């Protein structure tokens, strides 16, 4: 099995995530298979598409159960963008969607001067700028980092979620991803 | 607010970068992959690839360019030109692009904006507007339509566009500065980010645009001297506009 399994939920672009993982020296594969997801050394839940269709797909393939099993077994998972949001209890997107519930809190529509919130922004307390592209945001007591006062990273047990795209954030993003994957 | 973005735009035809890139330091200035990596290393915040040939036969070539670029680029990029259907958008996004840019196809059928946004999110849909004399133009700015620029910008945002790429036909290629009045007028009417385009001739022009809007598209100013991008960023910052901190490799 590869070092990293990227969860396939039927919505497009996993290419950039794979390229970034290769760049930091790890092998990866894209899979929707529950056994593979449950037993992978490291799992990335990427961020494309909408909450409703993503959850429907995860439930249909059994990936939801596999992600919960990993969480219970304390196996590491990184959620990126929508992948972070799916780990919370529920999302306001698409009229309300029940999510995985790995992380306490909910996802709400972003109230900002411009939505979508697009571009590079500094994340505190880490002090680096990363690339964001989102219209929804987490509200969670498990928040470990913020940007413009918004929750942009959450951690609960073995699950780490980031609202930014490390695979699109240049050297800073690769460094972040490298640190996450140093676990495997 | 996120930091203002500097976005080099590359014109591509038949899989090659065309027009205006002159630089001896690159092995192959026509190779979109090499140039994209070079600009990324030089501190570009994002890139736009515009398929200026955009014939149906050419779409496969563009798809493979997109995939090759996605394999080396660790910054976001948008692909425009020849996106006429959800299927075209899927092909490009699933090959690794972050966003597609719609122009005349959205004008002909505005529901296309909503259809792509529903599938991939608003952040994946840029609506490009070529504006002149108060109205939207098509065919690379040559043909005036009867659609008012401001009304179209508002409609595009309402239908789900995540960003507007606003090109002033009057200023495009002149290198005498962006059309700040037009940019400010559009930005005041929408709640999505706006990229100013057309007219960048100096760091001051870019700084002036970035003070009033979210991003600036640049072409000849950087293609004439790709190694000058880090210096251009420093000049813009020297004028008081904070850009993202980069670790220079170029």
Image (cartoon, coloured by chain):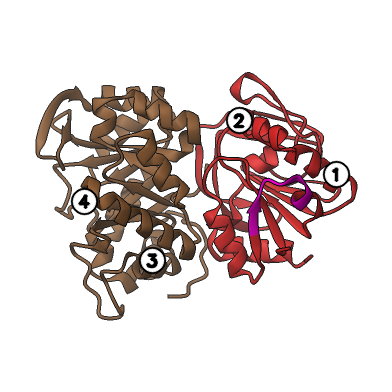
User: Which residue is more in the foreground, A35 or B221?
Assistant: A35
C-alpha gap between disc 1 and disc 2 = 21 Å
Colour-to-chain, brown: B
Looking at the rendered image, the disc whose residue lies closer to the viewer, 2 or 3, is 2
The span picked out in magenta is A29-36
- Residue lying at 25% horizontally and 52% vertically, measured from the top left: B58
Marks 3 and 1 in Cβ contact (< 8 Å): no
Q: Nearer the viewer, residue A18 or B56?
A: B56
Q: Position of residue B226 (x, y in %)?
A: 31, 70
User: Split into 4 quadrants, where in the image is the C terminus of chain B?
Assistant: bottom left
Q: Which residue is mark 3?
A: B39
Q: Are marks 1 and 2 in contact (CB under 8 Å)?
A: no
Identify the colour of chain A in the image: red
Compared with A173, B199 (above or below) is above
x and y percentages locating residue A181 in the rendered image: 72, 64
Identity of the residue drawn at 27% across and 72% down: B29
Does the magenta segment cover residue B145?
A: no
């Amino acid at each position: 099995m590869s070092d990293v399994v990227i969860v396939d939920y039927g919505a497009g672009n996993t290419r950039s995530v794979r390229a970034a993982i290769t760049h930091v020296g790890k092998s990866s594969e894209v899979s929707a298979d529950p056994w593979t997801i449950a037993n992978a050394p490291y799992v990335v839940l990427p961020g494309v598409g909408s909450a409703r269709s993503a959850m429907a797909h995860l439930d249909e393939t059994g990936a939801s159960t596999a992600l919960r099993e990993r969480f219970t077994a304390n196996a590491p998972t990184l959620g990126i963008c929508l992948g972070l949001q799916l780990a919370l209890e529920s999302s306001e997107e698409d009229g309300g969607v029940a999510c995985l519930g790995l992380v306490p809190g909910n996802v709400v529509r972003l109230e900002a001067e411009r939505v979508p919130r697009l571009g590079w922004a500094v994340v505190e307390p880490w002090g680096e700028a990363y690339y964001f592209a989102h219209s929804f945001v987490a509200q969670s007591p498990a928040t470990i980092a913020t940007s413009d006062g918004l929750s942009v990273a959450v951690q609960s047990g073995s699950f780490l979620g980031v609202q930014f795209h490390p695979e699109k954030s240049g050297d800073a993003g690769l460094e972040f991803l490298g640190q996450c994957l140093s676990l495997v | 607010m996120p930091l203002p973005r500097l976005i080099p735009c590359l014109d591509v035809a038949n899989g090659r970068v065309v027009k205006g890139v002159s630089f001896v330091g690159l092995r192959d200035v026509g190779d979109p992959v090499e140039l994209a990596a070079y600009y990324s290393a030089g501190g570009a915040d994002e890139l736009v690839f515009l398929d200026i040939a955009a014939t149906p036969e050419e779409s496969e070539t563009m798809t493979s360019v997109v995939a090759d670029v996605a394999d080396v680029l660790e910054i976001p990029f948008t692909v425009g030109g020849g996106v006429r259907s959800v299927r075209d958008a899927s092909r490009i996004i699933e090959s690794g692009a972050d966003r597609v840019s719609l122009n005349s196809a959205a004008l002909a059928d505005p529901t296309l904006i909503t259809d792509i946004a529903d599938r991939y999110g608003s952040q994946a849909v840029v609506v490009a507007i070529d504006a002149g004399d108060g109205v939207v133009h098509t065919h690379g700015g040559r043909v005036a339509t009867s659609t008012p620029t401001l009304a179209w910008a508002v409609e595009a945002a309402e239908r789900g566009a995540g960003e507007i790429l606003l090109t002033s036909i009057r200023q495009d290629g002149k290198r005498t500065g962006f059309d700040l009045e037009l940019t400010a007028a559009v930005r005041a009417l929408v709640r999505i980010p706006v990229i100013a385009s057309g007219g960048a001739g100096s760091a001051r022009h870019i700084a002036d645009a970035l003070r009033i809007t979210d991003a600036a598209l640049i072409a000849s100013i950087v293609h004439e001297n790709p190694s000058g991008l880090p210096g251009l960023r420093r000049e813009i910052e020297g004028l008081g506009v904070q850009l993202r901190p980069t670790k220079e490799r170029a």
